[in-house]
Image: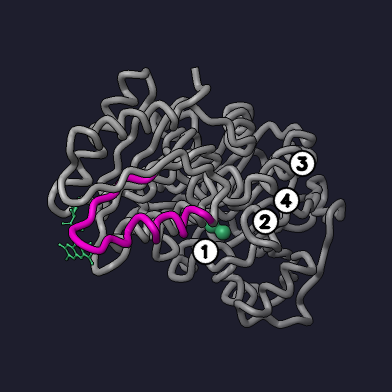
Amino acid sequence: MATIQLEHGVYSVGAKDWQRRLFDGLIPLPQGTSYNAYLVQGNRDAALIDTVNPGFEDELLANLATLGVSPRYIVMNHAEPDHAGSIPRMLQEFPEARLVLTGKGADMAAAMHELPSERVDTVSTGDTLELGGKTLRFLEAPFVHWPETMLTYLEEDKILFPCDFLGAHTAAGIYADELDDWESAAKRYFGEIMMPLRKAGQRALQTVEDLEPTLIAPSHGPVHRDPERVLSLYRRWTAGETEAKVTICYVSMWGATDKLVRTLADALIEQGVHVRLFPLPETDLGELAKELVDSRAIVLGAPTVLGGLHPAAAYAALLVRALKPPAERAALLSSYGWGGGAARQAKELLEGTKMELAGAVEVHGTPRPAQYTQVRELATSLTRGWQ
Ligand SMILES: Cc1cc2nc3c(=O)[nH]c(=O)nc-3n(C[C@H](O)[C@H](O)[C@H](O)COP(=O)(O)O)c2cc1C
Ligand SMILES: [Fe+2]
Ligand SMILES: [Fe+2]
């Protein structure tokens, strides 16, 4: 990615990773991602805010070289390797540079990276770093999405560098308002990364709103020239506001569970409820995470395999548990051939969530008329009180 000037003395100097297709061994990246790093140049000193994923160091260094700048400070907002993994190399390349991070950041960085402790300066909320006409203010924002996360704010220009917060996984574009599908990418990203930590997200959001930034430059995806757009979405998403929408993830080997799922989906659609179907296991889990952000109920459909839940459904159930979506209700649809076991295991997995189990329909083999009636009744109890 070429160096981009965002403001006088403020540059985007990171890298785009168009080819990456998976993050954390979990999150699909249909549009790749970017590792945004920023350079803030004052009259006296320059600071590099975050770095890039290992493998992209040369690109970052080339961008800094075009500016002819050697940063005096490297600010680590977050210790995860996609932003901090290149800090050791940057400290080598810029032997005068000091590393600026929080106390928690120092602990985390020490565990994850080889860093010279004598070059580290720790900061905490409210501390500032004066670069000469450009002042960086640091604000701790724990658990968005790791415990050590901090936000950096450039006071004179009202530019916020929130690291992973308010980002999106896409390599496309420079500014969010230039991308047709930015909102979709941002919602996916929220579902995958921030949804499980909504309370921390709400606190960080308040911190951001109090700053009234005019530009928000996250560490993944495009920059926000219209902060209100992303902030208003995050207000809803972090509050766990849901829609009359049911997300159904299911797997069926021979069509029995599939029949239950389609009956339920039709009954819900007749009630005017939005339905999203995710056939497992080929489903794009990012799309699933995106729909979970504002689904009011979640249904798992899964036959019994070898005495338990079909493994694809078990994976989906574990993912739902981990992502902690705000849905208020859940339901189960299942089929078995002899002893069963899927429904019991699914209930155990869903008991680890805050969702109320609205009902379960389990059939022996293929569904019979009475069981289709049960499924239609389930559609009613799942959406009780919604309209
Ligand atoms: C590989 C495999 C393993 C199965 N293991 C069990 C089992 O342990 N217990 C059981 O009750 N049924 C078992 N079944 C039967 C299915 O649960 C049953 O055929 C069910 O109706 C399939 O639902 P579906 O049509 O939605 O795939 C197994 C089926 C397959 C293909
Ligand atoms: Fe991260
Ligand atoms: Fe990240």
Q: Secondary structure at mark 2?
A: loop
Report how far apart the C-alphas of labels 2 and 4 lie in the structure: 15 Å
| Front tag of 4 and 3 | 3
Asked if the residue at label 2 sits under 8 Å from ligand 2, the reply is no
Residue underneath mark 1: 82
Q: Which residue is mark 2?
A: 143
Number of other residues with Cα within 10 Å of mark 4, as a class: few under 14, some 14 to 19, many 20 or more: many
Q: Position of residue 365 (x, y in %)?
A: 16, 51
Residue 123 as seen in the image, left or right of residue 377: right
Give the number of the mark in front: 3 or 1.
Answer: 3
Q: Which amino acid type corresponds to the residue marked 1 in the rendered image? A: Asp
Query: Which callout, 2 or 4, points to the residue nearer the camera?
Result: 2
Question: What is the CA distance from the residue labelled 4 to the residue labelled 3?
Answer: 11 Å
Give how far across and how far down residue 85 sits, in percent. 55, 71
Sequence-wise, the earlier of marks 1 and 2 is 1
- Ranked by sequence position, the earlier of labels 4 and 1 is 1
Region in magenta: 332-351
Query: Mark 2: which amino acid?
Result: Phe
Say if the magenta span includes residue 365: no
Q: Going 18% across and 58% down the picture, which residue do you hit?
A: 337
| Residue 17 in view | no
The answer to whether residue 289 is above or below residue 49 is above
- Element type where label 4 sits in the image: strand
Q: Residue at x 26, y 26 (%)?
A: 266
Q: Earlier in the sequence, mark 2 or mark 3?
A: 2
Q: How is the image coloured?
A: one colour
- The image quarter containing residue 207 is top right
